[in-house]
Image: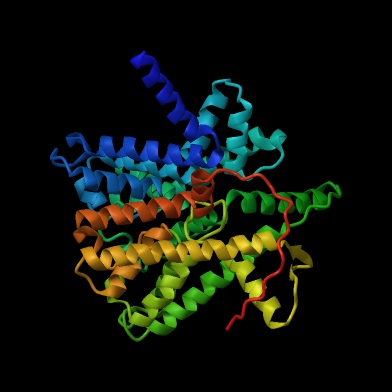
Amino acid sequence: MDIKKKINKIFDIAGFFTMNPGRTILFSFLLIILLGSILLSFPFATSNNIRISYIDALFTSTSAVCVTGLIVQDTATRFSIFGKLIILILIQAGGLGIMLMSYFTSFMLGKKFSIKEKITISYMLNVHDMRKLTSSMVRIILTTFVIEFFGAALLYLDFSKLFGHGYKAIFFSLFHSISAFCNAGFALFSDSFMQFKGDFSINLIITLLIIFGGLSFGVIFNVMEVLSAKLRRKVQGEYKLTKLSINTKIVLIYTSILIFSGMIIFYFFEHKYILLDKGIGTQYISSFFQSVTLRTAGFNTLDITKLQMNTILIMLIFMFIGGASGSTAGGVKVNTFGIIISYIRALLKGKTNVIIMNQHIRKRVINRAFLLVFLGLTVIFIGTMILTVTENFALEKILFEVFSAFGTVGLSMGITFYLSFIGKATIISIMFIGRVGLLTLMVALSDREKATEIKYPEGHVLIG
C-alpha cells in the first residue's frame, strides 16, 4: 500500500509539472541545469582534476543554460576540455530550449507527438496553427545550425592565424559562434574579447551573430519570406503579397535604434576616458561592439570596471530592455519597450487607442507590457536588497550585477567571483527568472481561472 501511495505521489508531481506548457518548460530548464551542475562538479570537468564547489557548478550550469555568461570560475583556465564541452552543450540546449531539442530528436527518430506535446511546442514557438508545428521546429533547428556553422567558419579564418590550422582553432571557432548566436557571452579567453578590440573582422562576426540571435526566429523567418517573395517576383515574375509583420517591424526598428543610440552614447561618455588612448577606428568598433553585446550577449572588449558612472547608468536601462521576444535574450524585450513607448506617445497626444503602423494594439497587450516591466523591476529590487545585505560592494556594482543577471547579459563589474553563497544563489535565481521569462513563470505558477461575465460598477480614483 505504501509503495502504491509513493507511486501515485510521483505521478501527481509529474502531472503538476506537465499539466500546462509553462510548467513543462520550467521543469525542463530546471532538469538540464541540475544535470549540468552534477557533470561540472566532477573532478574530470576541471583542468587540474580538483572539484569545484557544487554552488559554483550550479552557478556555471545556470549561467550556461540561461545563456547569461556570468562566471564564478574562469571558463578558459578552470575547466577541462570535457568541462568546456558540457558548457557548450548547455549553452546550445539553453539557447534553443531543451524541450525543443528533445522534440526535434524525437521527430528525427520518427516519434509522433501527443496533443499535450503539440500544445507545449506551440507555446514555445508561439505558433497558433498546429499544422505548422513540425515545419517551424525543423526550420528553427536547421537555421540555428546553419548560422552557427557559417559563423564558426568565418571565425576559423581569424583563429587559425592565432592557433594554427587544427583542433584548437576549430573548437574555439565553434564554441564562440554558438556562444555568440545563443547570446551566452561565454568566452575561452580569460579577458573575454579584450585582446581583439581592434580586430574589425572578429568584432563584426561576433556582433552579427549576437544580433541574429537576439532578433528571434519569427523575425528572421518573416524577413526571409519577404526577401524570397521579392526575389521570385524579379526572377520568375511570380506575385505573392508578403509583408513584414508589425512585430517584425517593431523589433527591427527598436533594435536598430537601441544599437546605434547605444553606440553614440557610449562613445560620447567614454571617448575622453577609457577610449582616449585608442585609435579612432578602435574607438568606433569598441563602442559598436559594446552597444550590441550590452543588451544580451555579455562579451566585452573593454574593461567594464573602468567605465564612467553615467555610462553604467545608461547600460542598466539597455540591459533591462534586452532583446526580442522569442529570442535567446533576456530582459523585458524590445517588443515590450516598443509597446510602452507607443502607449506613452498616444497618452501625451490625448488618444484613447494605441495605433502602431496603422494597426490597433489591444489593451490586454498593453497591460501585459506594463506588468512585465513592473514584475521585472520587482525582481531587480528584491535581488538588490538581498545583495546589499549579504555582500560588501558598492551599490552601483550590485545593481549592475543584478540587472545583468535579469537581462541574461553576463557583463560584470568584477564582483561575481567574490559573491557569497547567498549572493551566488540570488544571482542564480535571477538568471533563471530572466531566461524562462516572467510570463512563462506566471503561467507555470498559476491555474487558469474561468472567465466571468460579472461587471462591477466603475470606481473613480484620484491619480497624481
Residue 222 position, x and y percent, is 68, 51
| Foreground pick, 214 / 267 | 214
Left or right: 357 as drawn, with respect to 240: left
Query: How far across and how far down the image is residue 443, in percent?
Result: 54, 46
Q: Can you give x and y, in whole percent of width and height, for residue 129 in the image?
A: 72, 39
Residue at the location (43% across, 80% down)? 267
Q: Where the C terminus falls, by quadrant?
A: bottom right
How many numbered marks are there?
0
Q: Is residue 228 above or below residue 145?
A: below
Q: Is residue 343 left or right of residue 329?
A: right
Q: Residue at x 37, y 76 (%)?
A: 312
What residue appears at the point 55 percent right and 39 percent down from the top-left corner? 21
Q: Nearer the viewer, residue 184 or 338?
A: 338
Q: Nearer the viewer, residue 384 or 407?
A: 384
Q: Is residue 280 above or below residue 447?
A: below
Residue 417's spot in the image, x, y percent?
Answer: 21, 58
Instruction: For the N terminus, give its image quadrant.
Output: top left
**Drawn side of residue 332 relative to residue 303, left or right:** right
The reply to whether residue 154 is in sight is: no
Find the residue positioned furthest to the top.
Answer: 1
